[in-house]
Amino acid sequence: MAWDDKPFLRSYMSEPRGPGLSVDRSSFDACLRDAARKEGVRIETGVARDVEVHPRHVRVHSGGEDRLEIRASYVVDATGRRATIARKLGAQRTQRIPLIAWIAEFETADLGALVVEASPDGWFYTMGTDGGASVGWVTEPGRVHPRSAERELRAALVNAPLTRECVGDASIVGMTKKMAGSGLLDRVIGDRWIAVGDAAAYTDPIWGQGVSRALEVAERASEYLRAPAKARKRLQPLYASAIAEHWLEVERGRDEFYARGLNRFDTGFWRYYDQQARANPLQASVHER
Ligand SMILES: Cc1cc2nc3c(=O)[nH]c(=O)nc-3n(C[C@H](O)[C@H](O)[C@H](O)COP(=O)(O)OP(=O)(O)OC[C@H]3O[C@@H](n4cnc5c(N)ncnc54)[C@H](O)[C@@H]3O)c2cc1C
């Protein structure tokens, strides 16, 4: 990791907030589906577009051509940052500090390590993939035009020597853009629904802990769903405050970490973050909603 003046090594397993993980998402999802099938789960695929909550059940509709309709006692919203189900049910999402990650797939040898590096123009992560290395460039929205993204990323790499060393002059074979800010829902649980993972709260990719956190939250949600009906009303505010408190703690750590970036580089990106953080103070983000 190169965040301050001197690069240092960190073990992903001994992070104070829990392990940071880099997973091959499609294999991981396939493992989850296999495990669910073994437990007797029936798997249907479709895009959830609408939901209705009735006193004793909930219905989820796909609409469109697949016309799938699922009726169940509860629905778990695991739709990621979109939080489609929770938002259909009236929950609102607050994004605190908008950031964008430009992700470039380089045709190069695997690195065997994850490299994180702060630069004047944002920060970079580089990780090995099946066929090469994936470099994420986290920067402010609106800075880069999609048509010139590759050229601008290469230009920004000039000031990120460790990342540049990982990819050299290798070709870029694909480039995508992702939302990389942090945010959470004002309501994460209701009588017949519960939001988990990024649908409930999402954080900056700097800690690489979105997947392990999503698993922790899913475990907590499954305890809630297995609890006797009478206990659930009491458990709802506990679940909601656990989500908000964890998110606040991660955000506090992130503000401190980014402040170190501003100390090192007094440039547009780090000033943008600082201004946004001051304009969206943490307590207000959670408690005044
Ligand atoms: C740039 C970047 C880098 C990151 N790097 C890391 C990292 O190294 N390690 C880490 O642990 N985390 C990382 N994260 C965070 C991590 O990606 C998320 O925290 C994690 O994927 C959350 O899992 P999830 O299942 O809740 O949501 P998602 O992974 O977003 O999955 C949601 C799923 O729901 C599906 N879906 C969406 N809408 C619907 C709908 N209406 N109907 C049906 N299905 C739907 C989507 O197709 C998707 O399959 C990173 C995030 C970003 C932005």
Image (cartoon, helix red, strand yellow):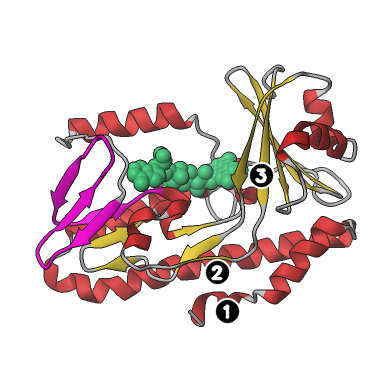
Work out which quarter of the rendered image holds the N terminus and state it.
top right
Residue 90 occupies quadrant: bottom left
Coordinates of residue 269 in the picture (x, y in percent)? 81, 56
Residue 14: give x, y in percent of width and height: 59, 47
Looking at the image, is mark 2 or mark 1 earlier in the sequence?
Answer: 2
Q: Nearer the viewer, residue 113 or 123?
A: 123
Circle 1: is it few (<14), some (14-19), or many (20+) Cα within 10 Å? few
In magenta, the rendered stretch is 50-79
Q: Is mark 3 within 8 Å of ligand 1?
A: yes
- Per the image, the residue denoted by label 1 is 283
Q: Which residue is mark 2?
A: 248
Q: Nearer the viewer, residue 247 or 148?
A: 148
Q: Is residue 77 left or right of residue 147?
A: left
Q: Nearer the viewer, mark 3 or mark 1?
A: 3
Disc 2 vs disc 1: Cβ atoms closer than 8 Å?
yes
* In the image, residue 65 lies in the stretch drawn in magenta: yes
N-terminal of the pair, mark 3 or mark 1, is 3
- Mark 3 or 2, nearer chain start: 3
Q: Secondary structure under badge 2? A: helix
User: In the orientation shown, which residue stands out farthest toward the left?
Assistant: 56
112 or 191, nearer to the observer:
191
Type of the residue with mark 3: Ala
Q: Name the disc covering residue 101, or none.
A: 3
The Cα–Cα distance between marks 2 and 1, rounded to whole angstroms, is 8 Å
Q: Residue furthest front?
A: 65
